[in-house]
Image (cartoon, rainbow, N blue to C red):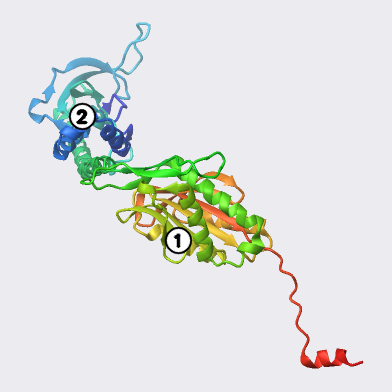
Amino acid sequence: MVKQHRNNLFNDCDLNVILENVCNSIIPQVEAIPETEFFSSSDSELVTNIIEQNSIKQIILHEEKIRMRKPALCRITPAGKIYRPVDGQDPPDLKDGMITQVEIPYSGDKRLLISRPSIHYKHGGPSFSIKEDRIVKYYVRPLYSDPKSFKSHFLRNYEKINKYLAWQAHDIALFDKKLRKLVVNAMSKRRERDKTIYLHLAPKPEATVFNPVHVRNRLHLRHQPAISGTPVISDEDFIKTIRVLRHTGNSFERTPTIYNVHNDQDLRNILVSNLNTHFAGDNNEDIFKLLGENGFTISFECQQALICKCLTWHCEEGLIHNLNTLLQDKLCRGCKIVLTIFNRTEKNFAALLDNIRKTLLKHPCMVKLKKEIADNEWHVIMNSHDDLIHRHWVHLMVFNLYFKRAADYPHLTTEERNFFAKP
């Protein structure tokens, strides 16, 4: 007895691909929920609806409805295949045979009949034709063969199909747990985002020109007193802040002999003073606050929207340590980070910049280099150590305060002065 169809079940594609595609579509589906429906429905209702829409319906074979059509006579070749005459001529050695059609009704997701589970045989399942609501198998055998061999063959095929369905059920059970977690997380993130407090920098007239900012900006907190949220600075306002830092750092570089003598804390204070000259909060108060020995921040109700650190370059390990410190803090979603580095000792500034760039790009939290603004300035995207989902804008600037000091000639000793004083 020979199988006539080569279209083996469970062998065309990986079930994991189908399940992964569903998982990747969850966030867009949650984001596409209309705002009125999103806020008027409870989380449990929305989660249930999304899960129902994306659940994979397993294949169920309806054993009680299996049907075998009446066998039909046919002619078979020595290889056991049905002979179909060509030009009306019969080849030699044809035998009388019998063909029997067996139909197994099913319900569930039709895609699963061609999907390979994580556990599977090398060549897939038995060969069946897939119809709309049933799978069909044609069994061909010699006319006077033992009917028990046909029944045994069918039962082996049926057992193999059920084994594949059990393997698929295991994969789908794991998927169902993952699906619920994804939907709940996506729903929670959208709810959380609606509590975001956007910090906007509005113009103030007396500011100095900063390519092309001509105004002092006021920071407005748009929130209601009874609602807590995450403070966020827009990318546009953050870029304005970077311009002020860049301008101040450039003034350091133009007169390194003046600023090199100041420690990191003094330089930090100068930067913060300039920032507060150009930006203000409500009621015209200073919006940039000192943080620790050499940092500063913008925060709202103890939540940081921006954090900056100023430090002198010493070595690669020092840079990595400071980055780790910033990224290990409990950062708010959307918190932006600035790292300002001062070179005081390295004569070859170009080589130092190349070293810093390589060290930055090799950092384990690095996601991508967004933009290389200048040889001494980089905009990168990084993850925090404890949160691989939310990403942060990290802006790193290096300013060169190195200058060649005049030779320090020693003073004459008393003996030397007496010697030269002799007539």
Q: Which mark is residue 334?
A: none
- Tell me residue 194's x, y (percent): 27, 40
Nearest to the observer: residue 359 or residue 250: 250
User: With 135 as the anchor, is 417 left or right in this view?
Assistant: right
Residue ID at (57%, 64%): 313
Q: Please tell me whether mark 1 sits on a helix, a strand or a loop.
A: strand
Q: Which residue is mark 2?
A: 36
Quadrant, the C terminus: bottom right
- Tell me residue 234's x, y (percent): 41, 42
Is residue 292 at least partly visible in the picture? yes
- Tell me residue 206's x, y (percent): 50, 44
Nearest to the observer: residue 188 or residue 233: 233
The amino acid marked with disc number 2 is Thr
Number of numbered discs overlaid on the protein picture: 2
Q: Which residue is mark 1?
A: 295
Residue 357 falls in image quadrant? bottom right
